[in-house]
Amino acid sequence: MLPHYSPLKVAEQFKVLQALYPDRIDLGVGRAPGGSPIDSYALRRERVDRPLPDDFPQQLVELLAFLHDDFPEKHPFKRILVAPYTPDAPLVWLLGSSLWSADVAAQLGLPYAFAHFISPEPTRAAIEHYQSRFEPSKHLDAPQAVVALGAICAETDEEAQRLMTSARLMRRRRDRGEWLPVPSVEEAMRELGEDALKPMRDTSEWPRYFVGSPTTIRKQFEALAQALKLDEIMIVTIVHDHTARLRSYELLAKEFALVAT
C-alpha cells in the first residue's frame, strides 16, 4: 500500500529481497489505504485533520525510477544510490479494483492484478481495458494479468458451502462496521439462521467466492480464465479453521497438479 510509505524506502526493502532471493521477488503496489479507518490513521505518514493529497501516480513513477535508476540526469534524486545494488529489480505489479488502476497499468506497461474478491462487478471491464490499452515498456512486452478471488474448497460442495458461512457472516459484520475475527461455522450458522446456506445474491458476472469441491471449482476457474484470457489466478481462502484452510489449498493444488499426488 504505497500511500503509507516513501518510494525510496520501498525500493530499498525490495532491493534487499531481490539480492537475497534473485528472480523470486515480485512487488505488488496498491493505492488503497487498506484496513479499517483506525488502521489507516495509524499507518498514515502525516496525522493531520485535513485529507492528504492523492499523489499515488507520482509515487508510483518515483518508485519505478528508484528501482531502475531511471531519473533524468538533472533530477535531484539521480545522485541517490539505492542499496544494495542489483543488476535488476523486482517486477512491479499494479494492484487494483477499478478501471483507473487498469488504465494506469496499461499506460505504464506494468503487469496488473485485479482484486475481484474486493470488487467483483468491474472485473471483466477492468481486465479487457488493460489488455486492449496496454503499451509495451521496459518492464513488460505484453499484457500480463492476474485475477485475485476468494476460493473455498472441500471434499464436497456441501462441506464447502458450510465453511463459506464464516466468510459470509464476516462480510455482513464488516458492512455494519464491525471489524471482528473470522467467526466459526457454528457461530455463523446461529447468527445467519435460515440465510446461512441460501445461495448468495451476486450482481457480478462471477461470484466473489468460488465455493465447492475440487472439480466444481476447477470448472469455474477454467471458465473465468478462458473468458478473460488469463494465464494465472490468485486465490485467498477465508475460513475460521486453519486446518480447513490448509486442506482447501491442498485440494486445489492437487486438482491443478501443483503438487505431487
Image (cartoon, rainbow, N blue to C red):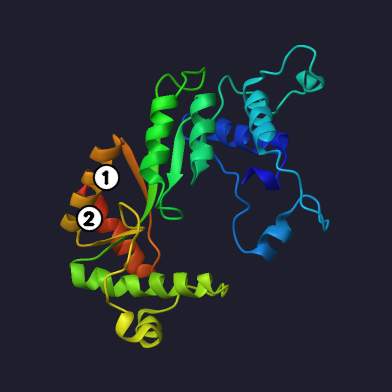
- Look at the numbered disc 1 and give the secondary structure of its residue: helix
Q: Residues within 10 Å of mark 1 (few under 14, many from 20)?
A: some
Residue 78, horizontal then vertical, whole percent? 76, 18
Residue drawn where x is 52% and y is 71% of the image: 174
Residue at the far front in the pictured view: 203
Q: What residue type is disc 1 on?
A: Leu
- Counting from the top left corner in percent of width and height, residue 63 is at 66, 31
- Residue indicated by mark 1: 224
Left of 123 or right of it: where is 20? right
Is residue 19 something one can see in this rendering?
yes
Determine the CA span between mark 1 and mark 2: 11 Å
Say which mark, if any, is on residue 234.
Answer: none
Q: Position of residue 112 (x, y in %)?
A: 46, 36
Q: Residue at x 41, y 50 (%)?
A: 116
Q: Is residue 22 visible?
A: no
Residue in the image at 76% along x and 11% along y: 73
Q: Amino acid at mark 2?
A: Ile
Which residue has dot 2 on it? 217
